[in-house]
Image (tube, grey):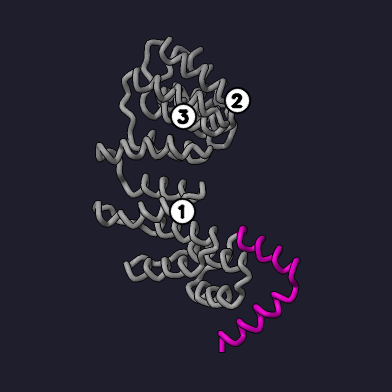
Amino acid sequence: MKHMVRKGVEPDIITYNAIMDGYCLHGQVNRARRIFNSMIDKGIEPNIISYTILINGYCKKKKVDEAMQLFCEISQKGSKPDVVTYNTILQGLFKVGRIGHAKKFFAEMLSAGPIPNFYIHGTLLNGYFKYGLVEEALSLFNKLEGKREDTDIILYNIVIGGLCKNGKLDEAHAIFENLPLIGVLPNVRTYNIMINGLCLEGLLDEANDMLRKMEENGYLPNVFTYNVLVRGFLRCSKITEMTTFMKEMTGRGFSFDATTTELLVNVLRESPSVLDMILELRSKIMK
């Protein structure tokens, strides 16, 4: 920016916002704040984008109090926060576990005027499920379904995944099975979520069936699918099945991710004989 000034080019609001955004993306929110203050000193009024960029930077660093101070400043300056700004604060509050504040903030948003959108609803659902507030999440979701609002497969994925993580596999499966009946098509992520949920419950036959159903419906499993299945078989000491999936996985050009590798190392540390079994089975399969 100094180079611009030396060339006689005065930075405008767009330039300041871009620089602040760059600093925030690299976690340098204090530098972004100095740019923000410098902009004001130069007589350039920050716009809602400026505030949202800096608020997001603070929230990512878990400095929610600083973010809230900036949020309050928006109204004091005669501007109005938009739905993106509200969503950014909500994400920050959930990130640090301030659930009560998040609920109160959302209520304030409803009274202030901005209409919640898809992203707000996604943030709320993710936040509720993250902290085990299943009833609150389902209450919101049922309202959205009743109004046919934001019932995109992405939100269904959040709900199905949230239920699985909170030990509500039957409820998750019921929603999954109901998708075609309401005209919503599952995607690869939907199947992966269900396969992961089944594996975590040790229901490996059902997980395998879900994989085949996924393929029959025209969805190719990806690296996440195979890693989830391999981890499931590893946890249940089903080495033969795991080795079969290893062959299929490597045949499609996929490899273990960090989580699967760590689990395999732990299994081998506890049961060194497993390595001999894997190598023996792999040699038979490759013949």
Mark nearer the viewer, 3 or 1: 1
Disc nearer the start of the sequence (3/2): 2
Residue 176: quadrant of the picture: bottom left
Q: Secondary structure at mark 3?
A: helix
> Along the line of sight, which residue is nearer the eye, 249 or 139?
139
Give the numbered dot on residue 30.
2
Residue 27 x/y as whole percent: 58, 34
Q: Is residue 72 left or right of residue 149?
A: right
Q: Secondary structure at mark 2?
A: helix
At label 1, the amino acid type is Leu
Residue contact between numbered discs 3 and 2, judged by CB atoms under 8 Å: no
Give the numbered dot on residue 33.
none
> Along the line of sight, which residue is nearer the eye, 112 or 38?
112
Q: For residue 153: magenta?
A: no
Disc nearer the start of the sequence (3/1): 3
Q: Is residue 287 above or below residue 262?
A: below
Q: Which residue is mark 3?
A: 90
Q: Which residue is mark 1?
A: 169
Tell me where the magenta segment starts and ends, as one range: 258-287
Residue 261 x/y as whole percent: 64, 63
Looking at the image, which residue sits at the far front? 170
> Along the line of sight, which residue is nearer the eye, 123 or 169?
169
